[in-house]
Amino acid sequence: MNIHNLKMFTKIVESGSISKTAEQMNISQSALSQQLRVMEQEFSARLFERNYQGVIPTNIGMIVYNRALEILSSYDRMLVDITNAQNQNKTVHILASPCVYSYALPCTFYHVKNKYPEYTLNMEMMSSKIIEEKISKGVADMGIIIGKPKDKNLSAKKVFTDRVFLVAGEKMKVPVQLDCQDLYHYPLLMLVNAQKTRQVLDKMLNKNGIRINQLHIPYALESTESIKLSAINGFGLAFLPYMAIKKELYNRQLRIVECPCLEFDNEYYSIKNAGSVPLNYESSKLIKYMEAILKETIC
């Protein structure tokens, strides 16, 4: 067993797809499948089952995944400690949900780097669910997720809220205001069910008596950016967070469609694992500074 194979394995679990993982790791799908077969031979057990969406881990696969996260966390910490010992470099590792990663943190990092130039800031994007799992295992120093963490052992602090608006492209013919029931009459662009933003939206729609299975959802997409581009081109209405669309609103590529019954905010929390290896005093100050300025420094 080697570190590379463990990283490969965790990426397959998190993406649910061998082909996507092969693309991310810049190797052929056949080579990745071969490495996976080697692991299964080593453990004398099947690690994945196939379904119509891709692959899902077996019970033994989940055992390997959970232990792999712990091993990779220790390995990454070891590399950081070696780097710090060699050149006094300081590193803070942050995990962020897709919207925060794309639209909030780039500008925040600029301000943090100006105040703490001696630090290296490593940022990774992944779903809120996976961030919780990794923070609970000490894989990173800080995570930023949508909503409160389900794991009560994690410390959490709300760092900002962001209003979600119903929007349409300028090319799309739609009134300036809609009632909830009007949603049935327009195509609605939605994220895939696995995304936390989609889950929050579904809950809001259900709360207002909207039958999701009767909405006209032409397809589900995996990223906010793809939803936004589809809306700009007039392919349908979309619920999008303000931080993702403020430039397009200013440039009049998108416009807000008022729908008072469905206004809601996404709440974003920073999470940490108090039981993992403690950060030094300066690193803790950096994270507190980031939490304090995040709301004001969103790009």
Image (cartoon, rainbow, N blue to C red):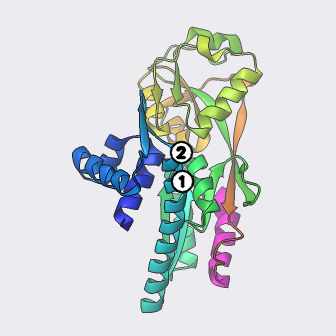
Give 232 or 75, whichever is nearer the viewer. 75
Q: Would you say residue 220 is visible in this rendering?
A: yes
Q: Position of residue 239 (x, y in %)?
A: 59, 29
Q: Look at the numbered disc 2 and give the secondary structure of its residue.
A: helix
Give 150 or 65, whichever is nearer the viewer. 65
Residue extending farthest to the front is 44
Circle 1 is placed at which residue position?
A: 63
In the rendered structure, the answer to whether residue 209 lies left or right of residue 70 reads: right
> Residue at the spot x=48%, y=26% of the render?
220
Quadrant occupied by the N terminus = bottom left
Q: Quadrant of residue 29?
A: top left
Circle 2 is placed at which residue position?
A: 59
Chain part drawn in magenta? 280-299
Quick check: marks 1 and 2 in contact, CB under 8 Å? yes
Around disc 1, counting alpha carbons within 10 Å, would you say few (fewer than 14), some (14 to 19), or many (20 or more)? Answer: few
Q: Look at the numbered disc 1 and give the secondary structure of its residue.
A: helix
Please state which amino acid type lies under the numbered disc 1.
Ile
Structural distance between the alpha carbons of marks 1 and 2: 7 Å
> Residue at the spot x=67%, y=76% of the render?
284
Decide: is 155 above or below 125: below
Q: Which mark is residue 148?
A: none
Residue 183 highlighted magenta (yes or no):
no
Q: Position of residue 154 (x, y in %)?
A: 72, 60
> Residue at the spot x=60%, y=55% of the render?
133
